[in-house]
Image: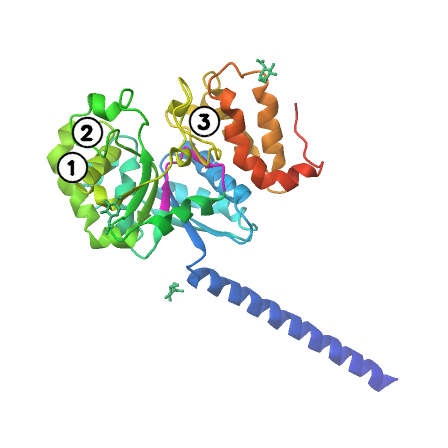
Amino acid sequence: MRWYIKYLILSLIFVIIYVSIYQYYDKYFDVKKSKTSNSSELIISVVVCGISRIEEVLAIIKSALIFSTPKDRIKFIIVTENDLLELLQEKLETYQNQRHFLFDLREIKFPGEDQELWRKLFKPCASQRLFLPSVLSDVDATILYLDSDTLFLSPPQEIFDYLRHFNSSQIAAMTPESEHKNVAWYPRFSSHPFYGECGVNSGVMLMDLTKMRSLKWEQEMLRLYEKYRLNLVFGDQDLINIYFSQHPEQLFILPCAFNYRPDHCMYVSMCPVEDGIKLLHGNRGYFHKTENQPIFNQLYESIQKHQFHSNPCRIIKEVEYQIQGTNSSKCSKLSDKFLQTPKRILKRNCETDDYRFDQ
Ligand SMILES: *[C@@H]1O[C@H](CO)[C@@H](O)[C@H](O)[C@H]1NC(C)=O
Ligand SMILES: *[C@@H]1O[C@H](CO)[C@@H](O)[C@H](O)[C@H]1NC(C)=O
Ligand SMILES: *[C@@H]1O[C@H](CO)[C@@H](O)[C@H](O)[C@H]1NC(C)=O
């Protein structure tokens, strides 16, 4: 009897030790894997300046996680001001129970002695994106840069899939600034060269950091700034346009559905979106305006308020409900295009009945 109990206790201790070791190794293995895996990791970078932008970047991250598949590994590199690092760290740690989400916080950095000059170039620190090749000097990959006023309406993998179409000279991808030169800003008003017929919009940009470094992109930006500083209206976006007007072979053009802005629907429908809108860009504050084209604000609010433990189908139902009262607005008339991809992705969640929202 006694030896039997001894044996039992011994086995129990053995099991406990085994389980602890196993867990330790599992964790260790997981950390190592996330640091070295590079083929399936999607790296997205957002620059955040000013505390008021924090809610926006959290909404982008939520949208990326809501619409991604569990096998995607998504890494957000947030570049921000020193005094926001702690707050962001705190907020993002709560997102980390999402298994496929990693984040990395970096401090804003500008080249050389011109720190203040670049910092003030138009919107607070928007020009930071020009220097991502050196700010992220340890990242040897093509990343997706996003303005803070954007939202995924599709799996992040979809835009990264365009990398397969890059040829050997292409270093970046963007969408046109406008679809028609009669209404586009650049051909009508700009006093500097720009890419193509209508210029490009820099709010959504795939950037091959490795190639950009080898082409001395940053030195080129400084040189173009010196030459064109008095002609710039949209700051860094103008510099990017000037660069690609001189090197058109280096740019890949993405479909406008990957940078869908109020201008695409507020007058006439200007962007073909048969396959649905993929990435929304609420520029000029449209995510925060309720009076004009409210569908931008409705989608932003619904995603921003979303809690990971609740059914994401609620986002679709909520926006559909709110739209009923507002479909006199031009963009809301295209609501099926805004919701097309979310509906396809979240279909199974909507078949169950466990979403609720306050009507
Ligand atoms: C990243 O992937 C490439 C090609 O798939 C491989 O050669 C390289 O060793 C990988 N790097 C790391 C750090 O895993
Ligand atoms: C890559 O594509 C661009 C745009 O179509 C083109 O101008 C360029 O010549 C191509 N480069 C190569 C190496 O084929
Ligand atoms: C919105 O559009 C739907 C379908 O076109 C229509 O049934 C509904 O009455 C419209 N609502 C308003 C407030 O215009």
Splitting the image into 4 quarters, where does residue 3 fall?
bottom right
Q: Is mark 2 within 8 Å of ligand 2?
A: no
Label 2, on which residue?
232
Left or right side of 324 for 292: left
Quadrant of the drawing holding the C terminus: top right
Asked if the residues shown at circle 1 and circle 2 are in contact, with their CB atoms under 8 angstroms apart, the answer is yes
Q: Earlier in the sequence, mark 3 or mark 2?
A: 2
Q: Secondary structure at mark 1?
A: helix
Give amino acid for label 1: Tyr
Residue stretch in magenta: 144-154
| Residue at 66% from the left image edge and 37% from the top image edge | 350
Give amino acid for label 3: Phe
Splitting the image into 4 quarters, where does residue 241 fall?
top left
| Residue at 23% from the left image edge and 53% from the top image edge | 213
Give amino acid for label 2: Leu
Q: Is residue 38 above or below residue 79?
A: below
Magenta span contains residue 22: no
Residue 251 seen in the figure? yes
Report x, y in % for residue 320: 59, 25
| Residue at 55% from the left image edge and 53% from the top image edge | 99
Q: CA distance from mark 3 to mark 1?
A: 31 Å
Label 1, on which residue?
225
Asked if the residues shown at circle 3 and circle 2 are in contact, with their CB atoms under 8 angstroms apart, the answer is no
Residue 310 seen in the figure? no
Left or right side of 27 for 140: left
